[in-house]
Amino acid sequence: MGTLLDFLIWVRVKLSVYFSILIHFCCNLENILSIKALKGFKDILPDEVGLWQFIEQTARDIFHRYGFEEIKVPILEKTELFVRTIGASTDIVEKEMYTFADRNGSSITMRPEGTASVIRSYIENGLYVRGSVQRLYTIGPMFRHERPQKGRMRQFHQMSVEALGSNSARIDTEVMAMAWQILQEIGLQASLEINSLGCTACRPSFKEALQGFLQVRIQNLCEDCQRRSSTNPLRVLDCKSEHCQAQYVSAPSITDHLCGACSDHFEDVKQTLSLLAVPYAVNAKMVRGLDYYTRTTFELLTTELGAQGAIGAGGRYDGLVRQLGGPEVPGIGFAMGMERLVMLLSQKDKIETRPVLDLFLITLGETAYEKGFILLQMLRSQGLRVMMDHEGRSMKNQMKQADRQNAGFALILGENELVNREAVLKDMHSGEQELVELTPAFEDWAGAVLAKIKQLQ
Ligand code: HAM
């Protein structure tokens, strides 16, 4: 009896030890596994990458058709660059920048947008000497510490363009037509809203009218708008509070305050957009969230992404280059949010974007595998996309892999094939099979396979 009791106690002690080890292991496992991406930062997985590449390649092609050249600028810049360009009292600068002290104590910021960096580079590298008009584009990640939601990330990607050196309204129209064309060619629909924010000559009278309007309602506005009504009144029109926006419905319109030159410019933009059959609507309340804009501003909007309806936006910034210490050079540009484009496209019919494998090389037996491994490299040098199995799997399994990889052809190379000096080439879509003659000269094999593939295609 005593021994049974001892045994049960022993079992209980052991079990509790094992149990606590298990719990400890699970807790640690959770710790190990729980390192996740930062909130608002997202991985772009292999299955999604095809759509990204499709969008980027379509846009690049169109940028080149319009004469734009790529520029790559750093992700980190001095904080002051963004404060001076985007504006100290904008949401981006006041609330959203990833700003920190560098190891030497200087304040640096992860770029929240691309324009400021491109203009800095344009001035620093004297790009204006390359020609009077410079058309530049850049593609890459931007960072804003916003509240993440559908279509709004903390790291997001923009394709942005800047046309520097022309005052002509035709450039405004070209740039908007280009944005429109990108959407058309990737198969998305949006509406284009445009406005004019005037210039240094006419904006003061609008500011005054707006300040008068705000003064009467100051008690009903959010804290930000109360403060900005005196420091930077245009910014209130960009407020995210629905309560504030409801009151701004009857606010004065900038388009009623444009000077003659700005008014003519805006008319020219509207007429030439119609000339190119780019549909638009004027939205006199659109001020954009960045301070550098003058004259034409625009947004490409969709109703399919909830609150984050802007898939692209931009405008003219005639004083920006001068303001950053460069020459008197006008500019206009826009940026498209790639996450939003991808989201819209993935809601539509599936676009086949996975890279297609030309050939899967199936080998059976050690000698065939060794020969096949070298042939693999030779076929790749011939420009084919080829893969093979290294795990010694069965013929059936290797055929399955070829299927899964969406391979156009499978080349079967076994010991018999080596003896008979011919390999079987199978068209994976039609099922048709052909023999490829394996000549005594091994270096000719890749050419023979390639020729047979071309013959079957
Ligand atoms: P923006 O309006 O701040 O303009 O941003 C342009 C586009 O970037 C937006 O329309 C949106 O599609 C995308 N975007 C902005 N923030 C986010 C976010 N948190 N998550 C996902 N997508 C976002 C600019 O950045 C100007 N630099 C455009 C420009 C170029 N103006 C003249 N040249």
Image (spheres, rainbow, N blue to C red):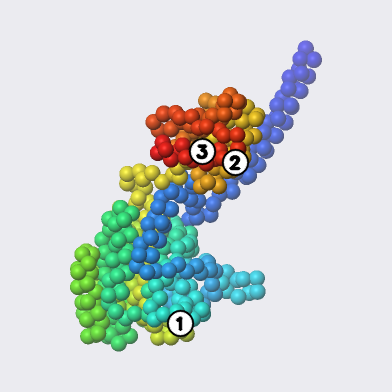
Name the residue tied to disc 1.
Answer: 129
Label 3, secondary structure: give it: helix
**Residue 240 at what x, y percent from top left?**
35, 65
Q: Residues within 10 Å of mark 2 (few under 14, many from 20)?
A: few
Total numbered labels placed on residues in the image: 3
**Residue 131 at what x, y percent from top left?**
41, 80
**Which residue is outermost to the right?**
3
Report the amino acid beneath label 2: Glu
Q: Residues within 10 Å of mark 1 (few under 14, many from 20)?
A: few
Q: Which mark is residue 97?
A: none
Of callouts 2 and 1, which one flags the residue occurring earlier in the amino acid sequence? 1
Name the residue tied to disc 2.
Answer: 443
The residue positioned 48% from the left and 50% from the top of the image is 44
Q: CA distance from mark 3 to mark 1?
A: 53 Å
Q: Taking 88 as reference, is 15 above or below it?
A: above
**Residue 18 at what x, y percent from top left?**
70, 30
Q: Which mark is residue 448?
A: 3
Label 2, secondary structure: give it: helix
Q: Quadrant of residue 19?
A: top right
